[in-house]
Image (cartoon, helix red, strand yellow):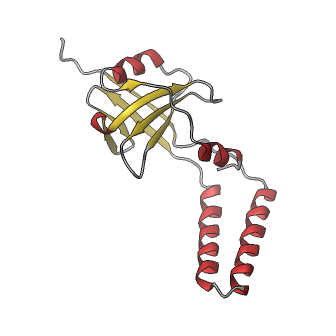
Amino acid sequence: MENEQKIINWQAPEYEFREKTSDWFWAVIIIVASGGIASIIYKNYLFAVFLILAAVLLLVYSIRKPEVVNYEISDKDLKIKDEVYLYSDMINFWIDKNHPHKRLLINTNKILAPLIDIPLPDEANEEEIKNILLEKIKEEEIKEPMFHRVMEYLGF
């Protein structure tokens, strides 16, 4: 049974949801209104329209609850929802235990998704995940980008 495929799968929310306060919504509205008014004063109407559209999308997505996503790690690849990530596109990985919730961070050579951030449930077998990944890519500490920390602090 040497050819038996190792598979680990679990479910987790796609992101950590934070309930937004009315102050948060008012802050977004005030910032966007100020930017929109300044854009109109400087006759940059296209930027004013862009700000309003961006604010509407931000407000809609800020109240959206995260969907529960299936994650699967196997000898062949990594699957998140319906998307498949090949090990040949991955550079390294790190299991971040310093974050309030454990996460698996994977650097890729993809331009649009250079860092894959996967939430790990508390009951996840980290050693088993680590052993499967070590067969394909190297383990190397990955620091969370400053942009991620700022966005998390702001409630996104």
| 59 relative position to 111: left or right | right
Report the number of discs.
0
- The residue sitting at 43% across, 29% down in the picture is 93
The image shows residue 100, relative to residue 19, as above or below, that is above
Given residues 19 and 135, the one toward you in this image is 135
The image shows residue 118, relative to residue 156, as above or below, that is above
Given residues 154 and 25, the one toward you in this image is 154
Q: Position of residue 67 (x, y in %)?
A: 51, 46
Residue located farthest toward the right when viewing the structure as drawn: 23
Given residues 1 and 145, the one toward you in this image is 145
**Which image quarter is the N terminus in?**
top left
- The residue sitting at 79% across, 64% down in the picture is 26
| 70 relative position to 22: left or right | left
Q: Position of residue 138 (x, y in %)?
A: 37, 24
Q: Position of residue 131 (x, y in %)?
A: 37, 17
- The residue sitting at 51% across, 43% down in the picture is 14
The image shows residue 27, relative to residue 17, as above or below, that is below
| 84 relative position to 45: left or right | left
Given residues 124 and 40, the one toward you in this image is 40
Q: Position of residue 10 (x, y in %)?
A: 44, 30
Q: Quadrant of residue 8?
A: top left
The image shows residue 94, relative to residue 56, as above or below, that is above
- The residue sitting at 64% across, 42% down in the picture is 149
